[in-house]
Each structure stands twice: as structure tokens, then as C-alpha cells.
Amino acid sequence: MLTSKQHELLVFIDRHLRETGCSPSFEEMKEALDLRSKSGIHRLITALEERGFLRRHKHRARALEVVRLPEDLATARSPQRFAPNVIQGNFSPRLPAVKSASETGAVSLPLFGKIAAGLPIEALRDNDSEIEVPVSLLGAGEHFALEVDGESMIEAGILDGDTVIIKRGETAENGQIVVALVDDNEVTLKRLRRRGNSIALEPANAKFETRILPAERVRVQGRLVALFRRY
């Protein structure tokens, strides 16, 4: 038997998969269940896995499979046999593109060029390039997309050629992956850590070194909220 919170989370994940075609983020699940931290979501997902209701696909960002539903939900569905929803994280944006933006609940975001040293973020923008993104992946605020160049974040599931969706902003919490502007001319995608009056920009690849810089040399341009990958 599931607890009320386990049942509520499973219902939310199943509905999100069917309505949007992608797994909800931990932040979306936290807000939907009105929890204070994401650690509670981790515990609920683990419990649902152990009970055979959910399956997590390791090494894929935001990839959850609903294996089965509680009897009350299964009987409320169509009499047709239930088929699990398997959604791969980092899926291609071509799936929702078969319909117009208004039909799929998508919005067009400016697609900036590749993140490269020596250019401020605005200089990367190609005014002719846009990408359609499901509204469900975005919260309030302004967003833009960037093409990833390089392998410094591969252990975080961000590969060369991926497209990351960034929420524009000048603040970020410790441990979040951000677009940072260093010395007003170098743009990089890294995990941010504050260390006293310094900021560490951490790669997710053992072959790359962490850069520790005075806080005044680093300006946050935005934080990572989603990722797309073409196969």
C-alpha cells in the first residue's frame, strides 16, 4: 500500500508524462507536492522504485518510467491494457515539433550560439535561430537556449552538441549549473560553488580543473533548467 504522498507523486508523474511527453523535474515535483526540499522527492521516488511502481533510467537526466499504477488508478483508466510510459531524458525537441507551438503548448526561445571563450553571452546570439520548447519545462521569467561546445560537463549528463535551456538571472544557489560570465568576456557553463569571497566554477569531468575566482570577476547570466539532445 502506498502512502498518501507516494500516491500523489505517482499520479503527478504519470499525468505529466502523458500530458507533456517528458518526466517532471525534481523542482516541479517538489512544488506539486508542496514539499520544502528535493530530498523528500528522492525518498519518495526510491520508495516507489522499491515497490515496483517506478523505474529510473540511470545516466539519463529526467528519465522516469511508470511501471504500474495502483488499482484505483488502473481501473479508472481506459479498459485497454495499461502500457508503461518510457521517456528518455535529454530527448529531441522534434517530438513536439510535429504540431504548431499553439497546439502543443510550446514557446519559441532565442537560440544563442555555442558557448565559447572570449564572447559575452549577447554576442553569441543568432537572431535568425529559435527553438520550440514545451511550456511545461519553463517557469516564470525569461529563458534562452545555448548549444553546448565541449565535454567539460559530461558527468552531469551534458554532452557536446546538446542544447541547454537557461533561465536568465543573476543569482544561483550553490551546486546549480549556471552560465557564468568571467571578466566580462568569457562565457562558460559550469557548476557554481561559493567559497567565502570566491566562486568556484566546477566542471563535471575529471579531465578539467575547477577554477576558483574572486566573486567580483564572475557574473551569473542564468541557470540550467532543461536540456535537449538530438539522436
Image (spheres, grey):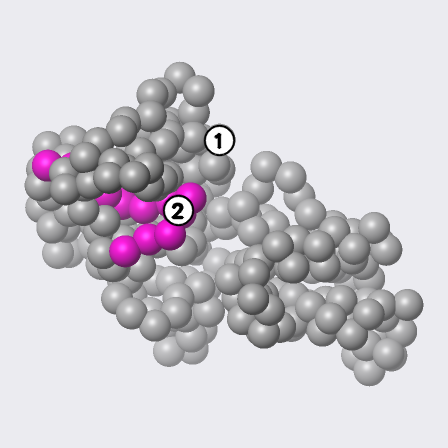
Examine the structure image and report whether residue 179 is included in the region drawn in magenta: yes
Q: Earlier in the sequence, mark 1 or mark 2?
A: 1
The tag on residue 26 is: none
Residue extending furthest toward the front? 196
Q: Position of residue 171 (x, y in %)?
A: 27, 56
Magenta residues span 171-183
Closer to us: mark 1 or mark 2? 2
Amino acid on which the number 1 mark rests in the picture: Glu
Task: State the residue lying farthest toward the bottom.
Answer: 76
Q: Which residue is mark 2?
A: 174
Q: Is residue 144 left or right of residue 206?
A: left
Residue on which disc 1 sits: 155
Depicted 33 relative to depicted 194: above or below: below
Does residue 24 show up? no
- Is 143 left or right of 225, judged from the image as shown? left
Q: Amino acid at mark 2?
A: Asn
Crowd around label 2: few <14 · some 14–19 · many ≥20 (10 Å): few
Left or right: 108 as drawn, with respect to 174? left
